[in-house]
Image (cartoon, rainbow, N blue to C red):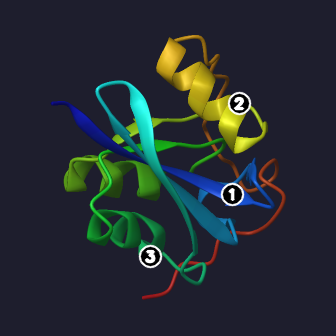
Amino acid sequence: MTTQKIAIPTADGQLWPHFGKAPQVTFVTVEDGKVTETVVKQAPEHEHGAMPRFLSAEGCTDVVCGGIGGGAVQLLNQLGIRLHGGAPTLPVDEIVSRYLAGTLIYGDATCHHDNCGGEHHHHE
């Protein structure tokens, strides 16, 4: 049996365009290509490294997201979580069905200060 736990940064059932600033995370468990569980949880506060560590603690294998900063990409890689960035802002069920069908189209996942809708705050 192949099991994936996919994390999707969300708000109101739709993909949130910036990985680290999402108010919620939707966790979708997939076994042998079929969704077996969907759970929505509050995301951690926006601070450097918080989201990747939260997803790792939740046992995530994959992340489907829109824009994401370089630090988060590196940390996800270090934690062994596969990143599928640059996904469009769509309802979660549409994201999941396209992801599972292999038809989800990804754009640019690079998040820069001037096009991600806000500032990044890095805490030492």
Farthest residue, direction left: 1
Name the amino acid, label 3. Answer: Ala
Question: Which quadrant would the C terminus be assigned to in this image?
Answer: bottom left
Name the amino acid, label 2. Answer: Glu
Confirm or deny contact between disc 1 and disc 2 (CB under 8 A).
no
Q: Counting residues from the N terminus, which is met first, the one under dot 2 or under dot 3?
A: 3
**Count of all numbered marks drawn on residues in the image:** 3
Return the residue at label 3: 50
Return the residue at label 2: 94
Question: Which quadrant would the N terminus be assigned to in this image?
Answer: top left
Residue 61 image offset from top left, x and y in percent: 29, 46
Position of residue 74 relative to residue 82, above or below, is below
Position of residue 1 relative to residue 78, above or below, is above
Residue 92 image offset from top left, x and y in percent: 68, 43
Return the residue at label 1: 10
Q: Quadrant of residue 26?
A: bottom right
Residue 77 image offset from top left, x and y in percent: 27, 46
Of residues 74 and 10, the one drawn nearer to the viewer in this rendering: 10
Residue positioned 27% across, 61% down in the render:
59
Q: Badge 2: how crowded within 10 Å, few (<14), some, or many (20+)? A: some
Position of residue 105 relative to residue 81, above or below, is above
Q: Badge 1: how crowded within 10 Å, few (<14), some, or many (20+)? A: many
Q: Quadrant of residue 122?
A: bottom right
Confirm or deny contact between disc 1 and disc 3 (CB under 8 A).
no
Using the rendered image of the protein, determine whether residue 86 is visible from the camera's viewpoint: no
Q: Counting residues from the N terminus, which is met first, the one under dot 1 or under dot 2?
A: 1
Whole-number angstrom distance, CA of label 1 to CA of label 2: 13 Å
Q: Secondary structure at mark 2?
A: helix
Residue positioned 68% across, 37% down in the render:
93
